[in-house]
Amino acid sequence: MIDPPEPVLTGVPGPPEAMTPARLPVPAGPGRLLVLAVVFVCAACGLVYELELVALATYLVGDSVTQASIVLSVMVFAMGVGALLAKRMRCRAAVGFGAVEAGLALVGGSSAMALYACFAWFGQSRSALVGFSLAIGILIGAEVPLLMTLIQRVRRQDAGGAVADLFAADYVGALVGGLAFPFLLLPGFGQLTGALLTGGVNAVAGAVLVLWLFRDDLSARARWTLLAANAVVLALLAAGVLLAAPFERAARQAVYGSSARVAVQTGIQEVVMTGGTGAGGGAGRGRKGLGGPLALYLDGRLRVSAETEYRYHEALVHPAMAGGPHGRVLVLGGGDGLAVREILRHRAVRSVTVVELDPGVLRLARTDPGLSRLNHHSLLDPRVRVVTADAFDWLRQQGLRGRGRREAPYDVIVSDLPDPGIAASTKLYSQEFYGLAGRMLAPEGRLVVHAGPPVERARLYWTVDATVRSVGLETVPYRLAGRPASFYGGPDRAARPLPPVDAEVPAAAPLAGGGRYWGFVLAARHRPRFGLASDAPPPAGLTRAELQAGRRGEARDRMSGLPPSTLIHPRYLG
């Protein structure tokens, strides 16, 4: 009697090898657990590659929403392409999976270094970002069909059960990878080394599964080819780890120049500082030193330049201090201590509270010789209290506290925050944010906001003004000339003369900007007085006539009828 043929597994059609039980060096149970463990590791590595591309693209290009959308959409599309391509490899699933993992380890592990190199030496990283997203997505998409075939060859089970086991391991691995990237890899190893180490783990996991568990599926030639390929990949990744530090120094010099002397990843952002190492006397206020004037970059964007920062900070602080009492002052942001320096020049100031998110910036402001000299050691003044917190969350917590525990009202609130066009900053320019800030103002208190470039991005600037007015405050918009176009904050430095996100304080002579401006909004419950206070020394780079001209210019150019920006509907991006 002829035995009936073994039934073909419904839902998993394929060539004969896909239906043939594999000869394994271990029983089916441990073999299946090993396959699921590799699924777990590969999923974790894949998500790390994805997050690393988003993080690095946000740092190099800006606008985290756009960069995340590009990376995720391209990768999801590419995963579908990879899954279709993997159908052709199922007849030799073990060999195919080994080749895919070796390629993924190399491409994913080196992606951060390659992307940074494109930015540093070619001034362009968008095409590289799309290319790596596409390649990594195709390789990740090819994993699942091949792993499905391999796990079925370890032990037959119904299609639903196999898919459930596979995706359970995949999703748990993605969770671990998603948590490991911000809490372990990024702060512990940085983006370059973290990606390279992830590639190494990926290569080892794939090699163990194919070269050991499924070794009987491989011909001698295939076995030696995969062994050699994995050895080359691991050697390249190891070389990348060894060369990461000198590569980063060389790339940083290509981006920031040879005077870059401080570079730290704080866990919030990358902080780079150039120049300002001597005690020189630029303009009588110690702005210049060895290596040129001090410049501070946060996530690749210039935030402080010693040659022009005094004009920006004087224009930000002094009009708000002139409108009435200013004994108690709150600074939102301003961790560099430069706005605080200007505040402390007013004799009537009794206390200053600084709410800064990044402790690394605060540490540099207190201890770096160049920056602490520039800010006149303002954060060490006994009148200054520093709170390390997100400005929005801190204001919200103050609002939730009982009246007896809440901070006393402030006479002046200075919002010295990054440009509103940056996705991460939109909540700090929202109606909800200004509503919380308004509750912290004394009856005669004033709020002043750095509101972005009023001419080059007029709609963005006037949206800030409309948002401040939407919470019941009256505003006086004003601007200050001198913001030049010498710094390119975006990735395409050679191709685009104007960055997508303007530098807050540019590196150039004060009046080199021609018709380019810094924009500010002064607000209070009643229309605030506008001018300069009488109890502070005369500003070094600002005149009353210049301020009044800036106020009149904005009064002429007012753009009305704009809706406010909210947390649910941010209106600064795009």
Image (spheres, rainbow, N blue to C red):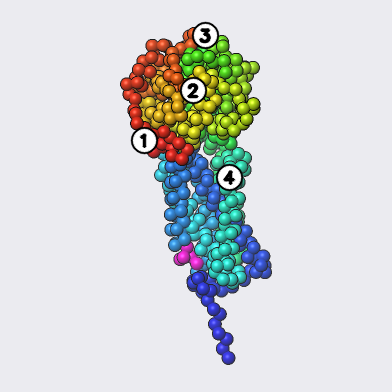
Give the residue pinned by disc 2. Answer: 447
Q: Work out whether 55 lies above or below 309.
A: below
Helix, strand or loop for disc 3: loop
Label 1 vs label 3, nearer the camera: 3
- Please state which of residues 362 and 270 is positioned toward the viewer in this rendering: 362
Query: Residue at (54%, 50%) from the top-left corner?
Result: 47
To which residue does mark 3 refer?
Answer: 535
On the image, the x and y values in percent for residue 379 come to 60, 20
Quarter of the figure with residue 472: top left
Question: Which disc number belongs to residue 526?
Answer: none
How packed is label 3: few (under 14 Cα within 10 Å), some, or many (20 or more)?
Answer: few
First-in-chain label (2 vs 4): 4
Q: Which residues are magenta?
A: 86-90
Give, as a three-letter code, the residue at label 2: Leu
Disc assigned to residue 495 = 1
Q: Earlier in the sequence, mark 4 or mark 1?
A: 4
Residue 390 appears in view: no
81 left or right, relative to 327 = left
Image quadrant holding the C terminus, namely top left
